[in-house]
Image (cartoon, rainbow, N blue to C red):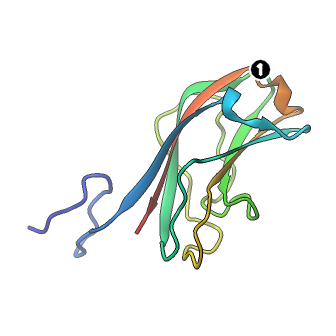
């Protein structure tokens, strides 16, 4: 039996090696209010040059409350959803949510800083609480 990385599920017939991850716990107070419906937060760890992003997940440990909705995307500062597909809700606490297949370029010709964006229903300043654990997987 081949050795599998414990952080990722096994793939039939394939050995998973060298998978790395960036994990960040963020709260609503960590975000910078963009003056409208969205707030952003840059992770402290970059995805390195030459990396290939496999996917990302978010676990909402405390719902982002106080507005009518709240959704999160994971981008790189220029492509707001490079590392996910769709706009998963962070308005309710949940188990880990697969953020879907990265919608932008998966290969990194240069290092990139992941940027989280939370968008409320009306004004980011109305969001009064929330905490999530964000994980990005890459090789």
**Label 1 neighbour load within 10 Å: few <14, some 14-19, many 20+:** some
Give the vertical position of 100 relative to 92 (above or below). below
Describe residue 100's horizontal placement relative to residue 28 as left or right: left
Q: Identify the secondary structure beneath mark 1.
A: loop
Quadrant housing residue 88: top right
Describe residue 44's horizontal placement relative to residue 10 as left or right: right
Residue that appears at 26% across and 62% down: 10
Front residue (pair 100, 27): 27
Residue that appears at 68% across and 44% down: 72
* Image x and y of residue 113, in percent: 62, 58
* Image x and y of residue 120, in percent: 80, 35
> Which quarter of the image is occupied by the C terminus?
bottom left
In the displayed orientation, state which residue is furthest to the left. Answer: 1
Give the vertical position of 66 relative to 136 (above or below). above
Residue that appears at 53% across and 63% down: 47
> Which quarter of the image is occupied by the N terminus?
bottom left
Give the residue pinned by disc 1. 66
Describe residue 86's horizontal placement relative to residue 45 as left or right: right
* Image x and y of residue 73, in percent: 68, 50
* Total labels drawn: 1
Give the vertical position of 26 relative to 113 (above or below). above
* Image x and y of residue 45, in percent: 53, 52
Residue that appears at 50% across and 61% down: 55
């Amino acid at each position: 039996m081949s050795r599998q990385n414990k952080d990722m599920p096994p793939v039939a017939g394939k050995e998973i090696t060298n998978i790395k991850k960036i994990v960040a716990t963020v709260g609503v107070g960590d975000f910078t209010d963009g003056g409208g419906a969205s707030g952003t937060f840059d992770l402290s760890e970059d995805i390195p040059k030459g990396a290939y992003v496999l996917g990302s997940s978010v676990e909402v440990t405390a719902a982002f409350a106080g507005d009518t909705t709240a959704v999160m995307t994971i981008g790189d500062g220029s492509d707001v959803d490079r590392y996910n597909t769709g706009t998963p809700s962070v308005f309710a606490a949940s188990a880990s949510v697969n953020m879907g297949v990265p919608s932008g370029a998966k290969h990194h010709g240069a290092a990139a800083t992941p940027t989280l964006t939370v968008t409320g229903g009306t004004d980011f300043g109305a969001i009064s609480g929330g905490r999530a654990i964000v994980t990005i997987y890459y090789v």
